[in-house]
Image (cartoon, grey):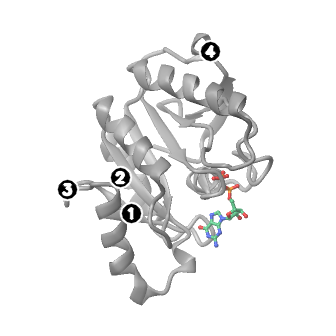
């Protein structure tokens, strides 16, 4: 699996645009600004692949990236951005509801902030993965901003807040330093049953 062989395929703003070609889909979820685009860029080893830092929450659409012709990284629209209109939030909710109900998700990748207690919205996303019968890997990003001594307490807080069992995978990550990139690639490979 060559994660650097990545191409943008399309965006979908409604269920008619969902890709249904049978390839596995890894759905990446996270609140705006948690570093979801940066994590995707880090995985594919390119700086400006998924958009970074522009107009958070403004676009309720999902973006499909094909990796090595074998699976899709599905970039779900970020949530939790305060300045979003009710209309935009409703659009986001309808799109998410349709995608989670579609049966198209193979694996969830829930990105949270390594420094903080996960938000109520983060927990809602985890519950949607569970209710859809989809396993999820939790990626605690921005670990470069944590002191090593803080990590055990942060792990415990994230596990507890998201209702994770000891068997549920939780990875610390830094999209800035690419720390734990190999571990994430191995986890994705294993969870998607590729090769
Ligand atoms: P998104 O809205 O979730 O796609 O977040 P972005 O990828 O646009 O990142 C939001 C901000 O966080 C940007 O300024 C990034 O440079 C920064 N960022 C993302 N990941 C990391 C990380 O692992 N460490 C640090 N220190 N900053 C990060």
Q: Percent position (x, y) of residue 72?
A: 52, 32
Q: Earlier in the sequence, mark 4 or mark 2?
A: 4
Q: Are marks 1 and 2 in contact (CB under 8 Å)?
A: yes
Real-space Cα distance between discs 4 and 2? Answer: 28 Å
Q: Percent position (x, y) of residue 195?
A: 34, 37
- The quarter of the image holding the N terminus is top left
Q: Are marks 4 and 2 in contact (CB under 8 Å)?
A: no
Real-space Cα distance between discs 1 and 3? Answer: 12 Å
Q: Hey, which quadrant is residue 10 in on the image?
A: top right
Q: Which residue is mark 3?
A: 167
Q: Residues within 10 Å of mark 4 (few under 14, many from 20)?
A: few
Q: Hey, which quadrant is residue 79 in on the image?
A: top right
Q: Earlier in the sequence, mark 1 or mark 4?
A: 4
Residue at 62% x, 27% y: name it.
Answer: 90
Q: Are marks 2 and 3 in contact (CB under 8 Å)?
A: no
Q: Earlier in the sequence, mark 2 or mark 3?
A: 3
Marker disc for residue 171: 1
Q: Is residue 104 visible?
A: no
Q: Percent position (x, y) of residue 157?
A: 35, 69
Viewer-nearest residue: 67 or 116: 116
Q: Percent position (x, y) of residue 128?
A: 38, 35
Q: Is residue 117 above or below residue 7?
A: below
What kind of element bears circle 4? helix
Real-space Cα distance between discs 2 and 3? Answer: 13 Å
Q: Does residue 79 appear left or right of residue 193 in this picture?
A: right
Q: Which residue is mark 4?
A: 17
């Amino acid at each position: 699996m060559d994660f650097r062989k990545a191409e943008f395929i399309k965006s979908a703003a409604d269920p008619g645009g969902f890709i249904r070609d049978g390839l596995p889909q890894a759905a990446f979820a996270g609140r705006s600004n948690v570093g979801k685009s940066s994590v995707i860029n880090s995985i594919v080893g390119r700086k400006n692949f998924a958009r970074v830092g522009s107009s958070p929450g403004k676009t309720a659409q999902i973006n499909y990236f094909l990796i090595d012709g074998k699976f899709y990284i599905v970039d779900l629209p970020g949530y939790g951005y305060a300045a979003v209109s009710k209309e935009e939030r409703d659009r986001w909710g309808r799109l998410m509801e349709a995608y989670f109900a579609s049966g198209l998700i193979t694996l969830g990748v829930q990105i949270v902030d390594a420094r903080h207690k996960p938000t109520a919205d983060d927990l809602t996303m985890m519950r949607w993965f569970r209710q859809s019968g989809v396993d999820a890997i939790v990626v605690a990003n921005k670990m470069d901003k944590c002191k090593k001594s803080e990590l055990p307490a942060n792990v415990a807080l994230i596990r507890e807040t998201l209702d994770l069992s000891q068997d549920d995978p939780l990875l610390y990550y830094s999209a800035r330093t690419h720390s734990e990139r190999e571990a994430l690639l191995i986890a994705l490979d294993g969870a998607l049953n590729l090769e």
